[in-house]
Amino acid sequence: MSDLTYIPYGRQSIDEDDIAAVVAVLKSDWLTTGPNVAEFEAAFQAYTSAVHAVAVNSGTAALHCAMYAAGVQSGDEVIVPTMTFAASANSVLYQGATPIFVDVLPENLLIDPEQVRAAITPKTKAVVAVDYAGHACDYVALRDICDKHNLVLISDACHAVGGAYNGQPIGSIADMSTFSFHPVKHMTTGEGGMITTDNATYAQRMRTFRNHGITTDHRQRAKTGSWFYEMVDLGYNYRITDFQCALGQSQLKKLDHWVSLRQTVAAQYDAFFADFPALQPLGLSADVKHAYHLYVVRAEDKASRDLYYAELRKQNVGVNLHYIPVHLHPFYKSRPETRPHQYPHAEAAYDQILSLPIFPGMVDQQLIDQVLDRIRSVVTAA
Ligand SMILES: *Cc1c(COP(=O)(O)O)cnc(C)c1O
């Protein structure tokens, strides 16, 4: 079986144009914050139809910036779905506030607006909507709840760049939307992240926060010929380098094509699983353009999922599991506000889900049929 090529669940695409873009910056005067940062921000802002885009050095930094800009602080609560990557909740703790986990909808594993409504207290400051797998959350319901209770709606859109909801691009819907450019995501800068927003005050606060809490950047100082700067709040060094932003610009040009290739892979999976009851894909709403960071299927029970996982791994199919619900991690289990067994949909899903390989290169390399063959043989042998 080891003669079969290993097919990972995700893989970046880097071409000669990407390499040339990075090399050009390495030969220039700027390595860190330079002209490519603003150019990448402008291109990303245009792509998402947002008004502002702020580039940082990871998706996690993007979430932390958003929490800061939203004014999240000690004593506040922020509602977070438990079916997500830990960073969605960690960013709340970075600001000294408390993440309040809520359950997800069983059909698509997205934050359940009714659970959000039930979790609101006088301390609630913000809601994090995670576009799990690349499928937009129910933003109509979430917007309504946030407006009624004066909460900031933060979209953790790390799975969803290139997607849309009711025809509106992801990145232009919530008060702030955060993105990651980790290599396993749709497009990469090595490590990197971005926040989009229509709110100029939020954008300005995040630009200060990513640079130690200092009000002017070196280019503004160079322009005024001044040595003067002021640190006005406690910030961090969340700056992204200029060569990473050159890579980001080059990658962004190919993003639409890559999203369509992901949709091609997903369509072939959908067709296959339509008469393959052992594994069933998550639901897809008609009003959503799915970006397919992940293609997630559910097995009947934990025993069959565990078996398929082990056997597919033996067959060199890089299946994965997204995610262990955050409230079940040892760190969060020991915290007073988290309650195991209070999130039945997320916990049931955790026993049944499997992420199948999905990345743009699967189409060219004709890997989809190979994956489907191996799934068929593993499941029929079980
Ligand atoms: C990848 C990811 C992050 C964190 O992004 P990094 O760039 O790895 O810091 C946060 N939230 C979700 C949902 C993610 O998938």
Image: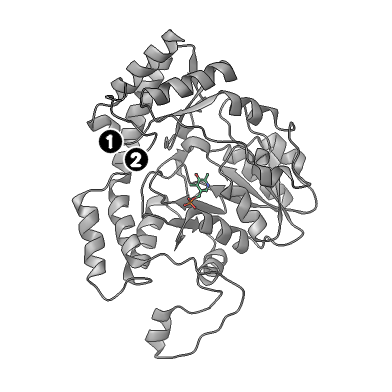
Q: Which quarter of the rendering shows the N terminus?
A: top left
**Where residue 42 sits: x, y (%)?**
37, 61
Task: Find the distance from the CA under tag 1 to the CA under tag 2.
Answer: 8 Å
Identify which residue is drawn at 26% across, 67% down: 25
**What amino acid type should be assigned to the residue bearing mark 2?**
Arg
**What amino acid type should be assigned to the residue bearing mark 1?**
Gly
Q: Which mark is residue 361?
A: 1
For label 1, the crowd category at 10 Å Cα-Cα, with few meaning under 14, some 14 to 19 and many 20 or more, is some
- Asked whether mark 1 and ligand 1 are closer than 8 Å, the reply comes as no
**Where residue 244 sits: x, y (%)?**
34, 61
Q: Which mark is residue 205?
A: none
Compared to residue 328, the image places residue 76 above or below, namely: below
| Relative to 260, 84 lies left or right | right
The quarter of the picture where residue 111 lies is top right
Name the residue beneath numbered marker 2.
11
**Where residue 53 sits: x, y (%)?**
45, 60
Residue 135, visible in the rendered structure: no
For label 2, the crowd category at 10 Å Cα-Cα, with few meaning under 14, some 14 to 19 and many 20 or more, is some
Front in this rendered view, residue 250 or 310? 310
Query: In what element is the residue under mark 1?
Result: helix
- Asked whether mark 2 and ligand 1 are closer than 8 Å, the reply comes as no
Query: In what element is the residue under mark 2?
Result: loop
- Answer with mark 1 or mark 2, whichever residue precedes in sequence: 2
Q: How is the image coloured?
A: one colour
| Relative to 149, 89 lies left or right | left
**Where residue 40 sits: x, y (%)?**
35, 61
Identify which residue is drawn at 34% across, 67% down: 242
Front in this rendered view, residue 9 or 358? 9
Identify which residue is drawn at 37% across, 54% down: 190
The number of numbered discs placed on residues in the rendered structure image is 2
